[in-house]
Image (spheres, grey):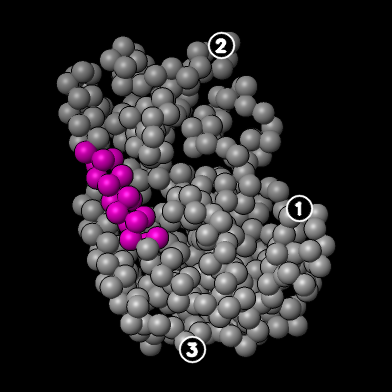
Amino acid sequence: MPGSVNYHLGGFPPTEIDWASLVSLIGQANAALARYDGMVAAIPNATVLLSPLTTQEAVLSSRIEGTNVTMGEVLEIEAGGGGDIEQPKRDDVEEIRNYRIALSVAAKAVEDRPLTPHLLREAHALLMDGVRGRNKDPGSFRTEQNWIGNAGCTMEDAGYIPVPQAHLLAGLDAWASYVAARSEPDPLVQLAVAHAEFEALHPFKDGNGRLGRMIIPLFLYERRVLSRPNFYMSGYLEARREEYIDRLRAISRDADWTSWIRFFLQGLIEQATENQAKARSILELHQRMQTEVAERTRSQFSPLAVDFLFSKPIFASSHFVEGAKIPRESAIRILKVLREARVIRTVSESAGRRAAVYAFPELLNIAEGRVVL
């Protein structure tokens, strides 16, 4: 099609990569990921303490696809607040929730199973359950040609046309064989190629971008490059969305795999460094809160209260009483102390049967990388 970029049929896996130009970045990326993994390994109960970063990753990955909701709005709605937040954003929140569920289930799966197209179909079904695109065969590969372009455009006006339908299953088999190979020179370059090829195949009717970015932590975890699937790269890609798209299309347009790999490796370095700094800040905050909350509340339940704040930095008072596993009277007293000490802030007051909603600003600010509360 004139002006369109068509899938690189016959061009995968790449045979011409300028390895010499990538050597330095490969070393830096592997070192940055090792430092990040070491930081995460030092965090007790990392799944809980880093859960805000998982939510932020889901928010940013979905934002690349057009959602318009913040992490704070996601958590506020989940806490039962956000009465003034309009329905489109509430729909976006459902997509964020599905992303977290799909990533969690898939991460558990790759502990015992390889990363395969079948596993991705399972994750896709969870990702698209009950949200925008739910009528586009969740969990099933497409059975007709698709294309990417401005909303409502025809294939003739598309910016990119993925692999023709007749070649999709063969393309997925080739992708699976490449991902499973243990003979590639470097796993991070292999990941860069695998992510790009999945996006180029675009095997589902919808949700390909989010699922393709989900492949990044799943591959790193499945290969044990990281000891946990807590790696978040959508911040880098969302901030460079136009370059991200152009680098991917240049693979099909110009057979330029090397520039894409260079872009991807640089992203791994920058995100590993940023994620490490955030993880360190969260760990330091957790340690400080353990001491501070214990001193302020004089309660044997203070560790449970702190862990709850980190698992749900925006929460309803009723959820705290139920979820922190603290006796009701003690829980109510701890909340009062934390409010008075400004450790938590009131997002919305209680009204009738509706519980008050509170936020833990310091943690939210770390996760979002800016002052939001």
Q: What secondary structure is found at the residue carrying circle 3? A: loop
Q: Position of residue 181 (x, y in %)?
A: 43, 85
Q: Which residue is mark 2?
A: 351
Q: Which residue is mark 3?
A: 15
Is residue 162 among the parts visible in the rendering? no
Q: Which residue is mark 1?
A: 151
Q: What amino acid is found at the position of numbered circle 3 in the picture?
A: Thr
Q: Are marks 3 and 2 in contact (CB under 8 Å)?
A: no
Q: Is residue 280 magenta?
A: yes
Around disc 3, counting alpha carbons within 10 Å, would you say few (fewer than 14), some (14 to 19), or many (20 or more)? few
Q: Position of residue 175 (x, y in %)?
A: 55, 80
Q: What amino acid is found at the position of numbered circle 2 in the picture?
A: Ala
Q: Is residue 229 above or below residue 26?
A: above
Whole-Å distance between the Cαs marked 2 and 1? Answer: 42 Å
Residue at position x 34%, y 56% in the image:
270
Q: Is residue 43 magenta?
A: no
Residue at position x 31%, y 44% in the image:
278
Which quadrant does the N terminus fall into? Answer: bottom right
